[in-house]
Structures are given as structure tokens and as C-alpha cells.
Image: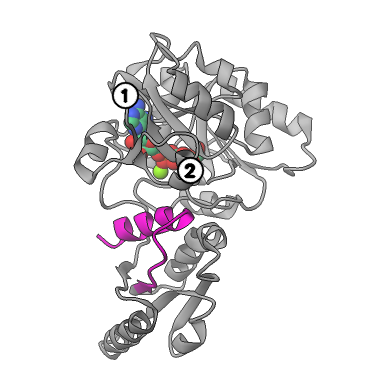
């Protein structure tokens, strides 16, 4: 691929410089591709109605065309044009969770081209909560398709440096607005039929959706891949081999220590993803703390950055603690399981 010049633009989230933002919005309108922050992870955006621009995203990420994209809009009403119908439950969830880390899959309208949906008759839509993302969509005056701004299958970016590491020379603009808050991708829910199906666990918890409707289940692996072709097993992975430790806390710590010593003896550089509580026990190895084990929001916020750091420090093997499979812990465990496959 020919290298292109990437312009890096710093924009403060809480004090948006509108002239810089206008430049980015203009670039989207001209068919360029722009990496921008959302509250979950950074996205790589293009005009959702411009097929040529969308192709550039697939090329830059080295992403196969069978993996459909999420369309980002400013508000629920903006979805009306893009879907055949807005099911009542989608309206309810939209009112409750948008703007925010929830993506809803609905029957697409004719406005959405096959390249966005990989030929599916549904489209994934989300209203991001990040002020820069909101402002960019408003300035572009277009819906914006945006996958996570990483190379295909790599760990999603939670700050601009991560995007630069993966995509500099491949995209037109990278907006740098510091760290994202949530740290894992949006929850993807198929709302075309009942019960609703979670195709990807993420930043909106199952528990919080259940407060609005009890008619929701987590799709099994086969179903998720069928409906959401991007949900490959090997995904969200660091370069190092990742091992997810088993067992409840004390047993888990012992399992990690045994395995880490073995791998180290064999000459491997071993990194460990740990909770604050257990981190002292792993001091013989390279330890990255992601948060207190009972503060799963903080753990989700830090996970990807710490995985990238262990890669940068050239670990051969990463062993991760397991986390509680509830609330945000579900998304953490989902990503760790996928990365360890
Ligand atoms: O938080 C996020 O969702 C981030 C930010 C940038 O918004 N975006 C993101 O996009 O994670 P991406 O492309 O990395 O993941 C999109 C997921 C994939 O698993 C894809 O299969 C699924 O959404 N998806 C997209 N369109 C779909 C559709 N029509 N039906 C089912 N799944 C779909
Ligand atoms: Mg992605």
C-alpha cells in the first residue's frame, strides 16, 4: 500500500477547537478517512454514504470485506433514514442508552450500501457519547462508519498513540483527544427479533439492559459469528501468546505463578495482567495492574493499554488473571477469552 501523509490534530474533549474540528469534518465530506475518539475506543471514520471512502478503511486496517461496519450518528431520530423500521424496543433502548456504548442491529434501509453491511440486510447503528465524536458527525453532516482504529484482529486503541502505532501513514487524519473512558468496545445487540440477542458484550452491561427488558439473551458463539461475521474467535489479540488463568483467587494466583515460572525457565519473557490486590505476588515477573478486582469499570478502562504495553516490552507470553463474569467483567472476560484462543 502507498504511504500517505497522516496529519495529527490535537483536540481537547472539554474545550473543542471548532476550526480544527471543521477541518476534520471537511475531510470526511471529501472522502478522506479520519481516526477519532469515542468513549469506548478510537474509531476510523469515513462518510457512511461514500463507498470509495469506505473502501479506504478496509484497506488501511487490512480488514476483510466480510466484516460489517457500525454507522455512527448524532441522535436516535437520525436513525430513521438508515433503517427500514425502528422497533419499539430499539426506541426505548436508544432513549435509555444513547449517547453511549450500545450498538443496535436493525433492518437496513436502501440508503445503506452493501459495503457497510457486508451484504447483510441489517445495519449496526450507534450514537457515541464522546463530545469530539458527536461534534465530528455534526460537522461532517453525514453518518460516519467507523470500525475500531486498529489493524485487523489487533487490540483496539484507547489513546491516539495506539492509533499512530497501527495506522500512521495509512489514514488522512488522526484526532488526538487523549484516553477513551470506557476502554472496551460497544455492546452490539440484534433488535430485529425477540428475544433481543447480544452479539458482542461491551460497554453497556447486560444487567443494565435487563432493567429495561427481560427479553434479552447472549447469542452463542455460532450464532454470533453467523449474524455478526466480524466476531471471529481470534480477535482483540496482542502479539504475544495470551493465556487466561483458571481458578478462584488463591488457586488462580498459584496457577499463574507455576505457569509463569515454567515459561520463564524455558527462556520466555513473561508478562502478567493482574489486579491490584494480587500484583505483589507476581513481582518476579513483568506485572501490569489494571485495577482493583472489584472495580471492573477501571479494569476495562486499562486492559487494552496494558496489553499493548506488554507487547511493546516484547513479552513472549502474557498470562492474565480471570475477572468476575458480571457487569463490565463480562466484556473483559469475553476479550481475554478471544485473545487466548
Ligand atoms: O465501540 C465500538 O463499537 C467501536 C467504536 C469505534 O464505535 N467500534 C467497533 O467497530 O468496535 P468494529 O468494526 O471493530 O466492530 C463492529 C462489530 C463487529 O463485530 C461486526 O461484526 C458487528 O459490529 N456488526 C457490524 N454491522 C453488523 C450487522 N449489520 N449485523 C451484525 N453485526 C454487525
Ligand atoms: Mg474492531
Mark 2 residue CB less than 8 A from any atom of ligand 1: yes
Which numbered dot is residue 149? 2
Instruction: Tell me, yes or no, whether the highlighted magenta stretch contains residue 336.
Output: yes
Judged from this view, the residue extending furthest toward the top is: 110
Q: Secondary structure at mark 2?
A: loop
Report the mark closest to the observer, 1 or 2.
Answer: 1
Looking at the rendering, the stretch of residues picked out in magenta corresponds to: 318-341
Name the residue tied to disc 1. 193
Q: Secondary structure at mark 1?
A: loop
Q: Position of residue 339 (x, y in %)?
A: 32, 59
Ligand 1, image quadrant it occupies: top left
Task: Tell me if residue 59 can be seen.
Answer: no
Which numbered dot is residue 13? none
Instruction: Tell me, yes or no, whether the highlighted magenta stretch contains residue 326.
Output: yes
Q: Position of residue 287 (x, y in %)?
A: 48, 79
In the shown orientation, is residue 165 left or right of residue 52? right
**The one of 61 and 233 positioned closer to us in this rendering:** 233
- To which quarter of the image does residue 1 belong? top left
Amino acid at each position: 500500500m502507498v504511504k500517505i501523509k497522516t496529519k495529527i490534530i490535537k483536540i481537547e474533549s472539554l474545550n473543542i477547537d471548532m476550526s480544527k474540528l471543521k477541518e476534520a469534518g471537511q475531510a470526511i465530506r471529501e472522502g478522506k478517512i479520519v481516526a477519532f475518539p469515542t468513549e469506548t475506543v478510537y474509531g476510523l471514520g469515513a462518510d457512511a454514504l461514500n463507498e470509495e471512502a469506505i473502501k479506504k478503511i478496509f484497506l488501511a486496517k487490512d480488514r476483510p470485506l466480510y466484516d460489517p461496519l457500525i454507522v455512527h450518528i448524532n441522535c436516535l431520530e437520525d436513525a430513521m433514514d438508515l433503517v427500514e423500521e425502528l422497533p419499539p424496543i430499539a426506541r426505548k433502548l436508544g432513549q435509555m442508552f444513547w449517547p453511549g456504548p450500545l450498538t443496535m442491529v436493525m433492518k437496513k434501509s436502501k440508503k445503506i450500501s452493501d459495503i457497510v453491511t457486508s451484504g447483510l440486510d441489517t445495519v449496526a447503528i450507534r450514537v457515541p457519547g464522546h463530545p469530539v465524536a458527536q461534534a465530528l458527525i455534526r460537522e461532517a453532516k453525514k453518518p460516519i462508519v467507523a470500525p475500531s482504529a486498529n489493524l485487523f484482529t489487533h487490540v483496539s486503541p484507547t489513546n491516539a498513540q495506539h492509533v499512530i502505532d497501527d495506522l500512521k501513514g495509512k489514514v488522512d487524519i488522526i484526532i488526538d483527544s487523549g484516553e477513551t473512558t470506557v476502554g472496551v468496545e460497544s455492546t452490539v445487540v440484534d433488535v430485529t427479533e425477540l428475544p433481543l440477542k447480544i452479539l458482542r458484550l461491551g460497554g453497556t452491561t447486560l444487567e443494565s439492559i435487563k432493567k429495561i427488558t427481560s427479553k434479552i439473551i447472549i447469542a452463542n458463539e455460532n450464532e454470533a459469528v453467523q449474524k455478526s461475521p466480524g466476531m471471529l474467535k481470534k480477535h482483540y489479540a496482542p502479539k504475544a501468546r495470551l493465556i487466561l488463568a483458571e481458578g478462584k483467587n488463591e488457586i488462580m494466583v498459584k496457577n499463574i505463578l507455576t505457569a509463569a515460572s515454567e515459561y520463564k525457565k524455558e527462556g520466555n519473557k513473561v508478562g502478567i495482567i493482574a489486579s491490584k490486590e494480587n500484583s505483589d505476588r507476581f513481582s518476579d515477573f513483568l506485572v501490569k495492574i489494571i485495577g482493583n478486582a472489584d472495580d471492573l469499570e477501571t479494569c476495562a478502562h486499562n486492559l487494552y493499554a496494558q496489553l499493548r504495553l506488554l507487547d511493546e516490552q516484547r513479552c513472549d507470553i502474557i498470562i492474565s488473571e480471570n475477572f468476575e463474569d458480571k457487569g463490565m467483567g463480562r466484556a473483559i472476560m469475553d476479550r481475554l477469552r478471544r485473545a487466548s484462543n
